[in-house]
Image (tube, coloured by chain):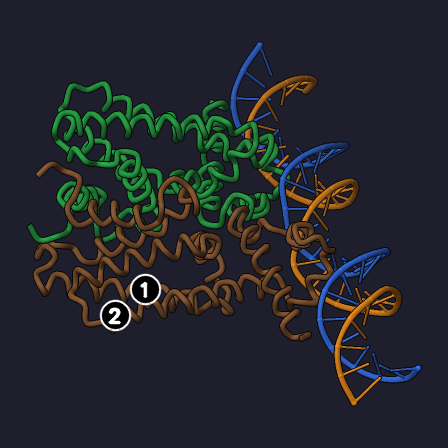
Chain colours: A green, B brown, C blue, D orange
Amino acid sequence: MPEQTTATRRDELLGIAARLFADKGFKNTTVRDIADAAGILSGSLYHHFDSKESMVDDILQTFQAELFAAYDDVLASDDDARTKIERAVRLSFAAIDQNPHEVAIFQNEADYLGGFPRFGYLAERNAQSRNVWMTLLTEGVESGALRADLDVTLTYRFIRDTVWVAVRWYRPGGGLSHEAIADQYLTILLDGIAHE
Amino acid sequence: MPEQTTATRRDELLGIAARLFADKGFKNTTVRDIADAAGILSGSLYHHFDSKESMVDDILQTFQAELFAAYDDVLASDDDARTKIERAVRLSFAAIDQNPHEVAIFQNEADYLGGFPRFGYLAERNAQSRNVWMTLLTEGVESGALRADLDVTLTYRFIRDTVWVAVRWYRPGGGLSHEAIADQYLTILLDGIAHE
DNA sequence: TAGCCTACCAAGCACTTGCTTGGTACGGCG
DNA sequence: CGCCGTACCAAGCAAGTGCTTGGTAGGCTA
């Protein structure tokens, strides 16, 4: 099975690259770093990939396709507004758990990479994510599940930032499960930290 | 006044460097970028600074000294727990307003720079910040101002992340003042977004 | 007016970067 | 057995990197 072996080796190299891009940044990671971590010489990477750019491109596209399919699932469901918001938060923390490197790369490099025409889809995905949350929050306010006086745009930014920035400290397999973190976060978000 | 002129030019160059470091990252900014933005040649920078590292060092130390003096002020006051938390949040958003580049550099580069012995103080400042927030939150729980069942550590991380990550989208002089953002954020944090 | 200081230029050195090139080892297949 | 495809090596190039060097212009001061 030569094709399967190829795909496997390629994916293996992408996983190694993703870890390094997440840890040290895209520009800050050299093709020699990646090759060293894979146990080959830097030139050998170019048997599998066109360029360093195409590696991060592949990593981000694969991850985002998965993530947005999950969001679409929530949007299309007939759950009530509050349940949809809870599901969207939970699946985001689950994504951090299952693809921490990919999330970190997206968080840290989207600004820089977005400057290149090749990565124009990053801005589109960003707008798509905004749409998801604005829809959910507006629905929440209209249905009476959320406060009527909420600044929806600002709330969107706070949710987005707080959820994704957790990738900086969350470690899969650590003391707290991603489900437990999502629970705690939803409690703070929905009911606040003040004593009632 | 030769010394004052020197200090002024030096500070001017540091401001230019801070903007570039914040926009493109420390490693990703070249000494030629900085010199170009200042209208001089790259070699001329070394009349004012030992190295590129010492530029970012100066930027971060100056900013952090200011910031932590402000936190100490809050800690030492005799306000009640809830007021102290509100003041700490507000002064953080004010810091983003007044020193957006410095905050961005600290947020984006602390991990990378922290690896060098020279920047060991970054880890110390991080621990100091943790201490400030943990003290405030613990005091809040003990005084009854905050819920008794709060996970203080997790709450600390959420506050820290949400406050500082605002530097990614907040623009001084934009539609929202930093005071208005702090107000909205404190409402969400303290009372939640759910309809009561 | 001589000496000194600040600010800068012009040139280039040693090194690192992403990527290219021509080649080898080896397993499977007709 | 001959042929092809996969996976890799060895060597190196052109561009770009942080930083150094020796020098100049012009203002201030003794």
Q: Earlier in the sequence, mark 2 or mark 1?
A: 2
Instruction: For label 1, count other residues whose C-alpha is less than 10 Å away and answer few (under 14), some (14-19) or many (20+).
Output: some
Q: Secondary structure at mark 1?
A: helix
Would residue A101 appear left or right of A55 to someone viewing this image?
left
Q: Is residue A24 above or below residue A84?
A: below
Q: Secondary structure at mark 2?
A: helix
Image point 62% across, 59% down: which residue?
A: B13
Image point 48% across, 33% down: which residue?
A: A9
**Residue holding disc 1:** B129
Would residue B186 appear left or right of A145 to someone viewing this image?
right
Marking on residue B75: 2
- Position of residue B51 measured from the top left corner of the image (x, y, whole percent): 63, 64
- Position of residue C29 measured from the top left corner of the image (x, y, whole percent): 54, 15
- Position of residue B31 measured from the top left corner of the image (x, y, whole percent): 66, 55
The number of numbered badges drawn on the structure is 2
Marks 2 and 1: which is nearer the front?
A: 2
Amino acid carrying mark 1 in the image = Ser
Image point 25% across, 62% down: which residue?
A: B133
Q: Nearer the viewer, residue A115 or A9?
A: A115
Q: Using the rendered view, name the quadrant where residue A52 is placed.
A: top right
